[in-house]
Image (spheres, helix red, strand yellow):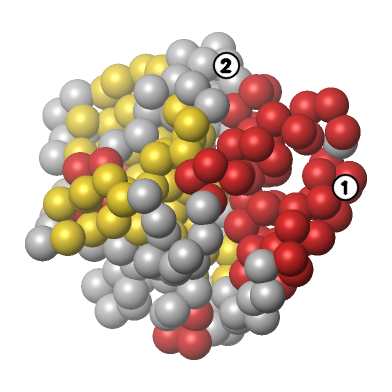
Amino acid sequence: MLLELRQLSVPPGQRVLLHNVTWQELEVILEELGEHRAARIAYDNGTLEIMTPLPEHEGNKEIVGDLVKALLEELDIEFRSLGSTTFQNQAMAKGIEPDQCFYIQNEVAIRGKKRIDLRVDPPPDLVLEIDITSRTHPSIYEALNVPELWRFERGKLQINVLREGKYVESEQSPTFPGMPLAEVIPQYLERSQTAGRNATLKAFRQWMRTLS
């Protein structure tokens, strides 16, 4: 299997599924793939998905992630962004690498930690998925008890909040109450395509300040 993985080439936007992968094999595969790679993984009860995102996906991920960081900074909320960190729980046989994730309410609990262990550490408070290639796995995030999942699909932002173990779509983010983010963030993402990143973030911060 390791020889095959070394030779594996997944074109952007495509995915490979491996079945009957044990947890021990998953750990070996992750080590073999390494941390500095374009491919992302999702693991659910023995099925491993390896996917390589499209350039459009990565560009959107960066802009939306920057908008969330700007939100937190303008609101003076301490946070820690961990990007596409691998989150896994052996007892649940689940593993996932989000497009972007943030510790906000639980930032203090993981402050300064070099590695996150979900057996003792909380999951991210907010996970972002750019769903251009239909890769999002809500059931894995539900199992890992991630409170809030943002899915960006077909130019729309869907805010999902965990309630009684299942995601329910919400018009507003509980992390940013009273803010019309499902409407505003897609507008600024689209704006970045013509105005550029810096000009868009500057305009977004100015919009934020009009709310205070």
Q: Which structural element holds mark 2?
A: loop
* Residue 202 placement, left or right of 2: right
Vertical order, 114 against 5 (above or below): below
Answer yes or no: is residue 95 visible: no
Circle 1 residues within 10 Å: few <14, some 14–19, many ≥20: few
**Residue 17 in sight in this render:** yes
Which quarter of the rendering shows the C terminus?
A: bottom right
Residue at figure coordinates x 30%, y 69% from the top left: 118
Give, as a three-letter code, the residue at label 1: Asn
Q: Give the number of callouts.
A: 2
- Tell which residue pokes out farthest to the bottom in this image: 108
Name the one closer to the observer, 188 or 29. Answer: 188
The residue indicated by pointer 2 is: 12
Q: Residues within 10 Å of mark 2 (few under 14, many from 20)?
A: some
Vertical comparison of 11 with 169: above or below:
above
Q: Earlier in the sequence, mark 1 or mark 2?
A: 2
**Where is residue 79 drawn, in percent x and y?**
58, 74
Q: Secondary structure at mark 1?
A: helix
Q: Name the residue: 15% across, 29% down.
A: 20
The amino acid type of the residue labelled 2 equals Pro
In this view, the residue in front, 165 or 208, is 208
Query: Residue 200 in the image: x percent, y percent?
Result: 81, 44
The picture quadrant where one finds residue 187 is top right
Q: Residue beneath label 1, please?
A: 198
